[in-house]
Amino acid sequence: MKRLFLRFAESIGAQTCLPLAMVALAMTLFLFGLRLPLLRVAPIDPDELAHLHCAWSVSKGMLIYQDFFENHTPWFYFLVAPLFSFFSVETNISDAFSFFFGARYLMWLAAGASLVLTFRLGILWSNAPVAWVGTVFLSLTTVFLGKTIEIRPDVPALAFFLACLIAVVSAIRSEASGLRVRSRFAFSGVLLGVALMFHPKILLVGPGFALAMLWYVCDPRGQRHFGDRLRDAIWQSIGFAVPLGLTMGYFAARGALQEFIWFNLLLNLTYGATTSMSPLPLLKLLLQESPFLVVFGLIGFAQGFFEMFGRVNFRRGDHVLVLSALSLFVGLFLTPLPYHQYYVMFLPLLALFAATSLVQLVEFFVAALGKRGERGNGSARVGITLTLLTGAGLWLLIRWAGPPVLIEASYIWLWVSAVVVSLPFLLARKRDWVLVIYLAALSVAPLTRMFRTLSPLNTKYKDTLQQIAFVMENTKPTDPVMDGFTGWGVFRPHAHFYWLLQKDFPIVTRQQRVGLLDDLRSGRATPKLVFLDRNLRQFSSNVAKFVEKNYEPFSRSPTGDHDIIWRRKDIWLDDRSSPLFGRLDVGRAPGSDLAGPGWSQPESEGGMSFRRSRGRRSWLRVPIRVPGAFRAIVRARLEWFTRPVRFELSVNGTPVGRARLAEGWRDYHFRVPARLLRSGVNSFLFTYSRVPWQDDPQYQGRNAVMAMEYLKMERQDQP
């Protein structure tokens, strides 16, 4: 047991840097433990609810990409979906909230794994001080903290990506050859493939990672022969193909391989060509929140970039980390919308680069202030260069980022104090204690922001939970909802294939926006509630106008958002209190509002109001509160006399009968079985056997087959 403990202590550097290891471990554990109360009170990002809704839809038997839109790879949703069987999230509000926070706990565990893997990568790449300082750097980064407690596929993807880097660097450094090393390369490929199946943004690391492996194969300075290096890369490629092949096979077996490729690759490439957002504002924010991380990280990256060309550093696999980080950073400028979560992937590498430059700088000063002739690990030239670069970098980047850097946590006085306090330890050549003092100074601003989040006044998350509960209380588990980008209908069916209707969402083309409007007007999409937020209003003004015309604000909304949650107006054909009871007049209000696509504007003739058909199909939206067996009576007349015309009536996609149109106004009767109707809005489709512009090009009249005055619905059973 003692031997195992000593080996463990040696593996984490506790013997060579005990004070630093103890303090860094305490800081990391404290910050990691602080996430537990944070994840209970942190504001809820709509992205979290969107990812949960996707997983919930998969749990209901829907096939992602084929039954509903998603442009993220599927393993996160496959992982979360089975967990819904243990919770009644559709009917029990307490279970719904428990599941949400339980999913955040899973992200907490995945973030912890990323911290451990970052430490392990630091040990492997450099040494224990760099590993400890880098792990604390990462723990103190507000962006990393904020996004890794949220429910996102980015979080497990990051853990698998870091594990891939550890596997490939350890394989490159190994002096052995044969199956043992190839298995490491294959395992690194599997890990990278798994990371890609959790999040498609892993593709951003692809160019840098591929270049690093090509360099490994082609450079004769490698520790193995060319043939062995080539086989290593082939095994890695095979490993990478395994998760991808399994996933593609799954969708191919269900006839959705084309959709999988389109929504995960081709559509995202098209998306990038149609919209873009500069990453500079968020880079400024990252600099304002963590200036020393950025400055030391850039210096450490530059140092690593130039040193990776050396024989020793190349054999250590430094080029894999440097080129991967470079690829991820350049990817920020290629990603159409580089939100905060995209920074999570390269922050561990940036933290390790920052730790490297900080440790080397401290080692230089420790050596420079020691006895003459004695030197630490860093040379005078490296130390002077790091000092000058740090000062110049801080001055330039702070000027670029703006005044908040100087104001936040009184950075100037804080660091003046830290330098003064560290001088006695520098003179005593106590490197670890100097690093401890600097880490303490680094922690002030992030901890201030974290505790600000824990303030009792920060109750934004409660508003979101109240809205989710309100939706659950006022809908049934089968009632569809339509959302812009609030996420309040997380555990309710969505009303349309494209269930994310954001203002900056060019993935949905103009034709598809028109199609959504047609689906709403025809009754093919029948949301019980609509969340008419700013995103939905800006997504399509015509859709917003439709909602305002056919829905009404839900005045009992709990948080005062009366103009966001809208419900269908109570105009039921089977309700005696409704102005539409029993009869829907398509030519006069309020029935005219229920006429969908395929009708001309209302007309009047001899005191009668009606609409003429237009095109091959016409739709009506028919609201029925209590489904049952009905007789539908259509009052219509023939408008085109050149050839015989029939029309077919379909209810919610199922034909119920045909009739031949005759001259003059007549009643046409159809039996509508109870099984075809649903509680809510039903789609009644009229399909015509002929239309003038197809069968008679010389026809000069209107493109109308029939005129319709009203639809009557007579109940044939007792509700």
Image (spheres, helix red, strand yellow):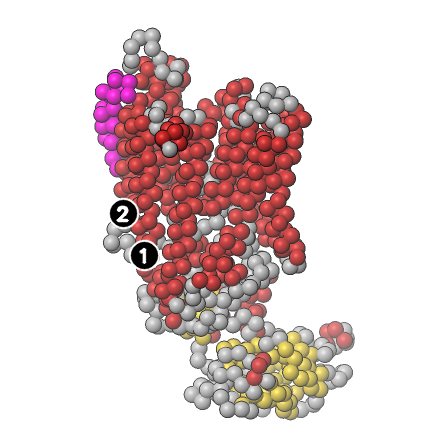
Q: Secondary structure at mark 2?
A: helix
Residue located 44% across and 62% down the image: 86
Give x and y (percent) for residue 463.
33, 61
* Magenta segment main secondary structure: helix
Q: Nearer the viewer, residue 453 or 568?
A: 453
Q: Are marks 2 and 1 in contact (CB under 8 Å)?
A: no
Image-based side of 190 in relation to 109, left or right: right
Between disc 2 and disc 1, whose residue precedes?
2
Q: Is residue 426 magenta?
A: yes
Residue type marked 1: Lys
Which residue is outermost to the top? 373
Above/below status of 236 relative to 309 = below
Q: Is residue 32 magenta?
A: no
Q: Which residue is mark 2?
A: 452
Image-based side of 708 in relation to 96, left or right: right
Above/below status of 109 relative to 77 = above
Q: Quadrant of the N terminus?
A: top left
Write down the region rendered in magenta.
Answer: 409-430
Give x and y (percent) for residue 6.
37, 28
